Image (cartoon, coloured by chain):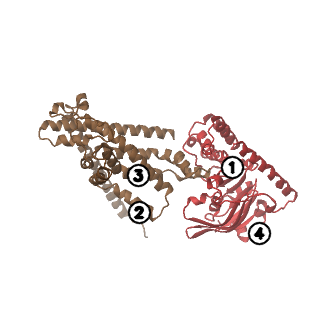
Chain colours: A red, B brown
Amino acid sequence: MNTLLKQKKVDNKTSVKPDIKENNQTKSEAAMDKNVFEVNNLNLWYGNDQALYEINMNVPQNKVTAIIGPSGCGKSTYLKTLNRMVEMVPIVKTSGSIQYNGEDIFSDKHSVEGLRTKVGMVFQKPNPFPKSIYDNIAYGPRIHGVKKKAVLDQIVEKSLRDAAIWDEVKDRLDENAFGLSGGQQQRVCIARALAIEPDVILMDEPTSALDPISTLKVEELVQELKKKYSIIIVTHNMQQAARISDKTAFFLNGELIEFADTDHLFSNPTDKRTEDYISGRFG
Amino acid sequence: MSGIDEKNNLKRIRGRVILNNVLKGLFFVSTTIGLIFLALLLYRILTQGIGYLNSDFITSFPAPYPEEAGIFAGLIGSIMMIAIVAPVAITLGVGTAIFLEEYAYKNRWTKFIQINIQNLAGVPSIVYGLLGLTFFVYMLRLGYTLLAGGLTMALLVLPVIVVAAQEAIRSVPSDIKEASYGMGASKWQTIRRVILPAAIPGILTGTILALSRAIGETAPLIIVGAATALYTLPDSLLSKYTVMPIQIFNWTGRPQEEWQFVAAAGILVLLIVLLFMNAVAVFIRNKFQKRY
């Protein structure tokens, strides 16, 4: 536990420097920052249907990276490739490389389980386990071998606080998580993802099933979380991408059309297709 | 104008409503017929058997006179048999279901295995008796023992348990599985902590149906050599044994009328044991459902 925590602190320190640099040179390229993911020539097939074409994309550390695009453009598939959840579909084939902190995620040296403890995920539909709120949060630490009640208590409280839901649930930790509202369930799911102390959090349209107020809460939470985590968020909602992200990627028909600073992409898109999409001409 | 012709349609609606009522009546009659026969059966057995059903009947061994005969050997034999069948069939059945649903690649082979398991569930029980006779009694040289009978019965109910457990496992929502895998849980951790707890009510229901079948089954046990009249209890897995249905079958075959009443009392004991098993299953299932 302690070593994990230390590790993260060191990571955070190193990542502060490039941030400052970027502020000095206003339009520094992503290459100057530290990247959590470096994706090169990624192709992906479901059986014989190609879903992703030659994706090249570097995901910066401690930033919010939004992925937008119309339905079926491959953005969720791409997100799930980053923690290899896409392989839950047995007919998936990939080519190309994805490096996580400089290491190939498809390499036999690393287990998917190890990758997923570092790259957590929040899903589209809130999917708490049919267990108590406490057991939901403690699930991750438990499967990774934490047994002491005191340590678990601490992790549960910290995760719920970090997910900005502690005050709402602290008196009902023993109640079934299904009894919470959709928005609360989603924040419990975020807390559950935080409890395994990941470096990256992948979010697959986390607010699409939520009402506007719950959505706002999750968006504020994302802003708070990026201080400690790198966040990649798939969203249908362009305004949301504009509000919360630092960088935005636009996907269309399985291709990465444009990837740039969010301000830049929305105010001054280079590609015609990006412009058409963000101005609402299709999709 | 195309589409709905209002005038004709009104007439047709009347026809549809009548058809609906006729069918409703038919379905009601079907249900009632089943219930009537069940009630008749219970009534007949109760009136015939209740006179012989007392504590002596439950604690006595078979005897040459109806008044002295009891079902003790069959009752204990049946319970011991279930004690063999349940662990063997549940372990193998749930294990098979987990493998087929969660580990095995979905290809032509698994589909082939799948179809065969479903077919096995429909194979006549006497065939399992022949299999048990060949394999357990002769090849493994277990002889006409409790163990051979129990293993034969376990094979008989195995397909039912596999199919029920598969259904239960398949009905666990995939999003909570994904949540578990997404946190770096291994397959087994996900199965043990997420899938099985959610699937246990369904697995239990199937299992109890299967065990109910095992406790009432006669034919295969006659083939693998269950005794018809036994004056001692089995004292080990390799003892001779009898079970309630065989005891009852034996009594019904005797010419004197009193024996029919003894058989009815035996059936009552069998029914009570069945009801008790079902009650336990319902209790366990409710307990698990409350936890989630």
Residue on which the image places disc 2: B112
Same-chain status of marks 2 and 3: yes
Q: Secondary structure at mark 4?
A: loop
Residue at far left of view: B256
Q: Label 3's element?
A: helix
Q: Nearer the viewer, residue A77 or A240?
A: A77
* Residue B231, horizontal then vertical, whole percent: 22, 35
Residue A220 picture location, percent across and down: 72, 48
Query: Which label number is shown at residue B87?
Result: none
User: Which of labels 3 and 4 is toward the front?
Assistant: 3
Which residue does the numbered mark 1 point to in the structure image? A198
| Location of mark 3 (residue) | B162
Residue drawn at x 66%, y 63% is A69
Frontmost of labels 4 and 2 is 2
Q: Secondary structure at mark 2?
A: helix
Query: Mark 1 to mark 3: distance in Å?
Result: 38 Å
Which quadrant of the figure contains the C terminus of chain A? bottom right
Gap in angstroms between the C-alphas marked 3 and 4: 58 Å
* Disc 2 packing (10 Å; few <14; some 14–19; many ≥20): few
Disc 3 residue type?
A: Val
Depth check, mark 2 against mark 1: the one in front is: 2
Q: Report in which chain the residue with disc 2 lies.
A: B
Query: Compared to B61, does B202 lie above or below?
Result: below
Label 3 resides on the chain identified as B
Residue B123 sits in which quadrant? Answer: bottom left
Q: Is residue B48 visible?
A: yes
The residue closer to the viewer here, B123 or B288, is B123
Q: Earlier in the sequence, mark 1 or mark 4?
A: 1
Q: Could you tell me the amino acid type at mark 1?
A: Pro
Q: Say which residue label 4 marks.
A: A270
Q: Can residue B40 be seen?
A: no
